[in-house]
């Protein structure tokens, strides 16, 4: 007669009713002496054995057996409520949730988390691509899925990240448009006298992001040293205009401004002082460098319309305000500014990011390297 099984012991067998393979493990005992079992299942014996051994390792390590009832939809619900809503900006949390609700949960929401495989994620990626979603959107979907599963691993709900193991669709880098030197000067000439002249000029001269420029306060500007301290960004969220921390740790930075830009800022400050006196009690003292007519912060949504008008008047056609940042970086590199310096000015998370986006502009530098070696070896 077989002896009583101990903790961590079990068996793998095929169920006759539907042909699925089951792994049954004893994980404990009730007060009355009855065994407490946990079951894993799979379509193949090999997969059932793999899952059985993973469960066995957890029990041997003294960890609780995973809950087999947790679904993908439940994971995203808990991730949002317990982590995202408290640890990231509301706009970011909303974006993560939107990706899950519209793309992941409708396809895999009912899937049990322990049954989720890399093949499931691969099929999700293929489905979204076949629906005509862009590569960047699909990569975003995979990234959000991977972050949620990473949290599931921390909670002990899964032992591996199926989304990380899935291969992301290849991204083909598209070179963003950039203003030429002549176009940039035509843009600045058209801006003269415009109420947003100083703001748009600053963005072109320094490559500041829109939210970073709008988040600047006078206390961030050292007119003697001609430097700006970037330490916040202004954003529109569901509750209105709010200031947030910069995008990354490297986004918090010091930016030098050209002397001409310093002159424009001085004039802008005088104009703002005059507007304050005219408004009187109606002035809302916010401390921002760029304000509306009553001293309050500028709404980021209103910039695009004004920017497009200026571009049309300058004969440049249809451009997006973010292309001022791209133009700033490209013009700096074209003038021989080192890649590392441009990366620091832009506040990129790494110099590799700068190189990936703007490396094609450095062709003349590569050519000069070849010329230098020719002089050394054959000169």
Image (cartoon, helix red, strand yellow):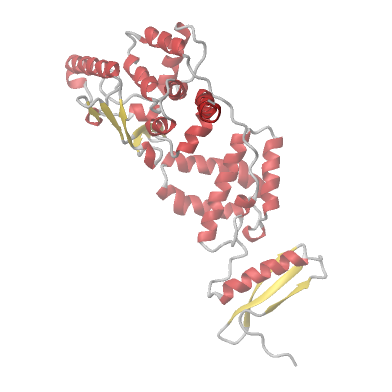
282 or 8, nearer to the observer: 8
Count the numbered circles shown.
0
- Where is residue 48 shown, x and y percent of the image? 72, 67
Residue 93 appearing in the image: yes
336 or 64, nearer to the observer: 336
Residue 37, quarter of the rendered image = bottom right
Question: Residue visible at 48% across and 14% down?
Answer: 180
Where, quadrant-wise, is the N terminus in this rendering? Answer: bottom right
**Up/down of 198 relative to 118, above or below:** above
Side of 3 where 27 appears, left or right: left
Question: Residue visible at 45% across and 37% down?
Answer: 351
- Where is residue 186 shown, x and y percent of the image? 42, 8
Side of 257 where 373 appears, left or right: right
Side of 311 where 4 appears, left or right: right
List the single residue furthest toward the front: 379
Residue 171, quarter of the rendered image = top right
**Up/down of 333 relative to 247, above or below:** above
- Where is residue 208 shown, x and y percent of the image? 38, 27
108 or 323, nearer to the observer: 323
18 or 309, nearer to the observer: 309
**Up/down of 12 relative to 328, above or below:** below
- Where is residue 376 shown, x and y percent of the image? 51, 30
Residue 286 appearing in the image: no
List the single residue furthest toward the bottom: 1
Question: Residue visible at 48% across and 41% down?
Answer: 94
């Amino acid at each position: 007669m077989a002896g009583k099984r101990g903790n961590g012991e079990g068996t793998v067998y095929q169920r006759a009713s539907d042909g699925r393979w089951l792994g049954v493990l004893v994980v404990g005992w009730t007060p009355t002496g009855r065994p407490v079992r946990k079951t894993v299942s799979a379509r193949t014996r090999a997969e059932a054995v793999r899952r059985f051994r993973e469960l066995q390792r957890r029990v041997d390590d003294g960890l609780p057996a995973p809950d087999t009832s947790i679904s993908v939809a439940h994971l995203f619900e808990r991730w949002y409520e317990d982590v995202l809503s408290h640890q990231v900006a509301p706009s970011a949390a909303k974006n993560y949730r939107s990706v899950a609700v519209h793309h992941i949960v409708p396809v895999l929401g009912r899937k049990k988390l322990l049954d989720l495989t890399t093949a499931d994620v691969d099929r999700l990626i293929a489905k979204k691509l076949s629906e005509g979603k862009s590569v960047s959107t699909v990569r975003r979907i995979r990234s959000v899925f991977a972050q949620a599963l990473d949290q599931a691993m921390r909670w002990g709900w899964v032992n591996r990240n199926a989304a990380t193991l899935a291969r992301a669709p290849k991204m083909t880098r598209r070179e963003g448009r950039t203003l030429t030197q002549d176009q940039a000067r035509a843009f600045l000439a058209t801006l003269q006298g415009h109420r947003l002249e100083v703001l748009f000029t600053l963005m072109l001269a320094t490559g500041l992001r829109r939210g970073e420029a709008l988040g600047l306060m006078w206390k961030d500007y050292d007119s003697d040293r001609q430097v700006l301290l970037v330490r916040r960004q202004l954003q529109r969220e569901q509750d209105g205009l709010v200031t947030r921390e910069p995008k990354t740790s490297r986004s918090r930075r010091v930016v030098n401004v050209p002397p001409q830009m310093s002159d424009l800022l001085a004039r802008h400050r005088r104009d703002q002082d005059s507007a304050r006196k005219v408004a009187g009690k109606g002035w809302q003292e916010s401390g921002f460098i760029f304000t509306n007519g009553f001293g309050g912060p500028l709404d980021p949504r209103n910039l695009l319309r004004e920017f497009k008008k200026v571009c049309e008047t300058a004969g440049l056609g249809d451009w997006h305000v973010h292309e001022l940042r791209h133009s700033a970086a490209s013009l700096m590199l074209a003038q021989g500014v080192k890649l590392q310096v441009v990366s620091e000015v832009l506040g990129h998370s790494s110099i590799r990011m700068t190189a990936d986006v703007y490396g094609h502009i450095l062709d003349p530098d590569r050519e000069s390297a070849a010329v230098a070696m020719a002089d050394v070896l054959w000169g």
